[in-house]
Image: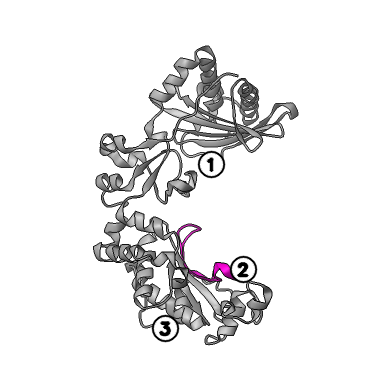
Amino acid sequence: MSPAGTNKENMHMTYEEELAEQKAKYFALATRLDRFWNGFSGPDPTWDIPYPIPRRKGCWGRCYASRYNGTTYFGFAAHWARWRADANPAKNEFKLDDDHLWLDRQNMVLGADDVLAWLSEVERDPDRANRRIAEEFPKDERMGVVPRSIVERYIPDAYSIGKALGPAKSRAFVRIHASGYFHREENAQLEDMTANQFFEYCRIAYLAAERKDDHLDRTLTGREMYHRYADGRCGALLEIDPDSPDEFLAWLDHKTPCTRDLGDHPWEIKCGGNTTHIDLYVGRPRRYDWLPDAKKKDSKESRTVFVGLRGHHIGRIVETVKMFLALHKAGLPIWIDDADDVRDRIIGRDLMGLIPESESLHRGWQEFPRDFHVSDVLHFSDFGRARRFALPFVSWRPLPVLLLR
């Protein structure tokens, strides 16, 4: 936390004085929370407090708190400011973490004051306070879901996977799905696979999903393409006999003649971050793990692998589907993860998640229950002037209710 303040009262404070002031406020807030009903994360109590920011008309913040072994852990999101604090009054321990502070330091300095003041209002008139939350909390800061078809209608170019894929390829994938292809796992299984066969898969995939910024050299072999365009941490895949199924299976099972490290990324054929790359992966079929050791040594199952694609980020899903279609057209066994969700995203019948404006969209889909099948997220503000047209189709996540014990 920088020593300079932003409000008149702490403008001339030293860093130590300001930190001491914040410590007293958070100790008071940690104690004050015990007057209110809490939720739970396992056995630990949690609180979720929407609160108005009096300095900014119509603006609200969110205070999240959880307690473990006497320490209350606070997380704040308030008008482009995010910070954390830990407070344990019994042990006189306090820590303020502003490493993730964005643009608005004033709200961090006054955040504990704002929440304490708001909790006083809740205590005086809980009915009125909770009515204010329900009526005034900004929709741009709420979580919810909206059909992709509505997003495509009002934001036509940003989130339409079917449009980006094109009508012919969209219809081709939907027809394959409707045929029951993804109900038969044997459609992705191959016996006696070699490294060179895997590299041929890669060549077809690279050619099918080529983008302008890939600068793909189409004259290269599959092995050369993999060496140049994949992640690079191949785990000795380039070192084994490329035409030996025995060596490939030994490599796949982490056995001799080569070693692999858990940090290797041999399947990452198109690079990206943790959620933004594309995998063309090879693994054992599910039934293999349940086979007795005798059958694992010498049987058809011991020679069989499963080949699939994984790359469902909104920026990579079109490339992934193009790869699948090209490999399928070439007559090669191939799978794509979560095929039902991919089909729904292509035809625009899935749900998209709405994330608070103050929150990053990165990994935002993880905030929604699995049975919602949310793969992509956006901010409600992305609708711009079309907010009022999209609003009737939004299902909002319930806001927390603040109740005294």
- Work out whether mark 1 precedes mark 2 in sequence or the reverse, and give the earlier one: 1
Q: Which residue is mark 2?
A: 289
Check if mark 3's residue and mark 1's residue have beta carbons within 8 Å: no
Which x, y percent locates residue 284? 56, 71
Q: Which residue is mark 3?
A: 221
Q: In the picture provided, is 214 more to the left or to the right than 304?
A: left
Q: Amino acid at mark 1?
A: His
Q: In the picture provided, is 336 more to the left or to the right than 402?
A: left
The quarter of the rendered structure image containing the C terminus is top right
Q: Nearer the viewer, mark 3 or mark 2?
A: 2
Which x, y percent locates residue 393? 31, 38
The answer to whether one can see residue 256 in this image is: yes
Q: Residue at x 35, y 62 (%)?
A: 318
- Span colored in magenta: 262-288
Which x, y percent locates residue 289? 62, 68
Q: Nearer the viewer, mark 3 or mark 1?
A: 3
- Alpha-carbon distance for marks 3 and 2? 34 Å
**Front-most of residues 398 and 3:** 398
Q: Residue at x 53, y 25 (%)?
A: 110
- Alpha-carbon distance for marks 1 and 2? 44 Å
Q: In the picture provided, is 251 more to the left or to the right than 275?
A: right
Q: Which residue is mark 1?
A: 100
- Work out whether mark 3 precedes mark 1 in sequence or the reverse, and give the earlier one: 1
Which x, y percent locates residue 214? 37, 69
The quarter of the rendered structure image containing the N terminus is top right
Q: Amino acid at mark 2?
A: Asp
Outermost residue toward the right in this view: 91
Image quadrant of residue 325? bottom left
**Front-most of residues 78 and 165:** 165
**Front-most of residues 290 and 334:** 290
- Alpha-carbon distance for marks 3 and 1? 46 Å
Check if mark 1's residue and mark 2's residue have beta carbons within 8 Å: no
